[in-house]
Image (cartoon, rainbow, N blue to C red):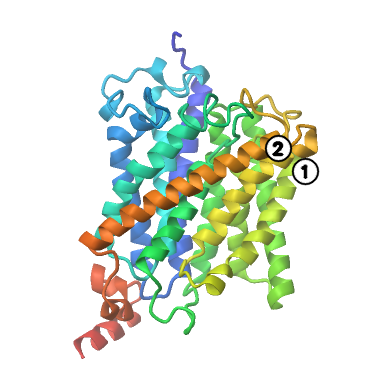
Amino acid sequence: MEFTLDSGNTAWMLTASGLVLLMTPGLAFFYGGMVRGKSVLNMMMMSFGAMGVVGLIWVLWGYSAVFGTDVGGLFGNPFDYFGLDGMTDDQSLMAAAGVPALVAVAFQATFAIITVALISGAIADRTKFSTWLVFSGIWATVVYVPVAHWVWGGGLLGADGITSSLSVPIDFAGGTVVHINAGIAGLALALVIGKRKGFGKEPMRPHNLPFVMLGAALLWFGWFGFNAGSEFAADNVAGRAWLNTMIATCAAMLFWLLAEKLRDGHATSLGAASGVVAGLVAITPAAAAVDTYGAIAIGAVAGVLCALAVGLKFKYGYDDSLDVVGVHLVGGLTGTILIGFFATDKNSTWYPDGALNGLFYGGGFTQLATQIIAALVVVAFSFVATSVIALILKATMGFRISDEDEVTGVDLTTHGETAYEALGARMTTEVKA
């Protein structure tokens, strides 16, 4: 096929790429505000570190290993477009939309970056920065790349994949690839690294709720590029994805606050910010596959379930510091599985070949079964692979800082600086003493 540039679509995808890249600094604010004051810089550095490591990996072999020639359904050939050498626009993932190959690479890079950054919230306050950087590169290559290939590159969960006898899984913008993948990886890391000192015994409250609110706002803003950009064109499907992203998030925030009010007696700013993220996560796989009512329902269910799920770490004793499991794993599972109930092609020109309507729209249980299978495959693979990577790094480099450094604060002991001058002066005095 001869490539024909569409300047409108290209301009939109460049914009969407910038929006999604902004989400990672937004995540840094969101996570940074949720930790204690002695850990905020390290928490933000983990997001920025992921940008540096994964950004380089992506243009060298990451993109090719996702979208290159299929190798046994497991991954793409990493040497097809290694270093983007010799890549032409007719090979672009977005060629049909008239978007050049390099723009497609840029857009997909932002997804890989934020997926890795999301994991960091599960291991806040106690992680070696150097080991985190090494983990980021290995995980992006060994876990993210295969899952992305399975779903978007024609692999195991594609049109000819393991569910082909049923239907094709629907994941418009990354419910499985990004959120289930990162959420279960966060759980695996939290279990391998262990609990923070004082977890469950002393308060570990967010130190800066305005940062949390700012981070949630930046995430919501950037997410319109994440979801609407996944159409690869400026058209009515992108409009549907944009609108569903807004209304599902509104519903999730309100229902999180309602659940919080009924449970605790207060509707909090932390709950509002967390509800926003839960809604964004849940609608991501379904953004262009459901109608207005489906989007509202998915947001509402995610708001309640995620609000309840963040307490599971205290019940079961795993230290998921910033609720990556409760928000991203549970939210990702919610959105991915509810597609099996709410998927409909009645209001959209987008619908993957082989996918079926959901149970509530006359499609029976088939698409629901497909969605569950896809979610479980990603959960199992990511948990096992992440655990193996983490155990190897724990045995070789060590994955957590010393108890003394953790008590003093990872900002000062790892980075030699603190976010707040008065706090830094006090910590320095304590260290010298």
Residue 45: x and y, percent? 33, 60
Q: Is 258 drawn above or below residue 98 in the view shown?
A: below
The N terminus appears in which quarter of the rendering? top left
Secondary element at tag 2: loop
Q: Report if residue 175 is visible in the image.
A: no
Q: Quadrant of residue 423?
A: bottom left
Figure quadrant of residue 79? top left
Q: Quadrant of the C terminus?
A: bottom left
Tell which of 207 and 192 is nearer to you. 192
Q: Is residue 335 visible?
A: yes
Pick the residue in front: 242 or 50. 50
**Which of the labelled discs sits on residue 238, or is there none?**
none
Residue holding disc 2 = 290
Looking at the picture, tell me which residue is in the foreground, 22 or 245. Answer: 245
Left or right placement of residue 272 versus residue 136 in this view: right
170 above or below 186?
above
Indicate left or right for 14 with 272 as reference. Answer: left
Residue 11 versus residue 147 in the image, above or below: above
Residue 148 x, y percent position in the rendering: 45, 36
Amino acid on which disc 1 is placed: Tyr
Q: Residue at horizontal 42%, vertical 75%?
A: 36
Looking at numbered disc 2 in the image, what kind of residue is underneath it? Val
Q: Is residue 218 left or right of residue 356?
A: left
Tell me where residue 108 appears, x and y as whole percent: 43, 35
Q: Are marks 2 and 1 in contact (CB under 8 Å)?
A: yes
What's the residue at 24%, 87% (across, down)? 429
Q: Secondary structure at mark 1?
A: helix
Question: How far apart, in angstroms, are the residues tagged by discs 2 and 1?
Answer: 8 Å
Residue at image coords 21%, 60%:
396
Task: Point out residue 400 in the picture as x, y percentages from the top left corner.
Answer: 29, 68
Q: Which residue is mark 1?
A: 293
- Please name the residue shown 47% across and 66% down the image: 320
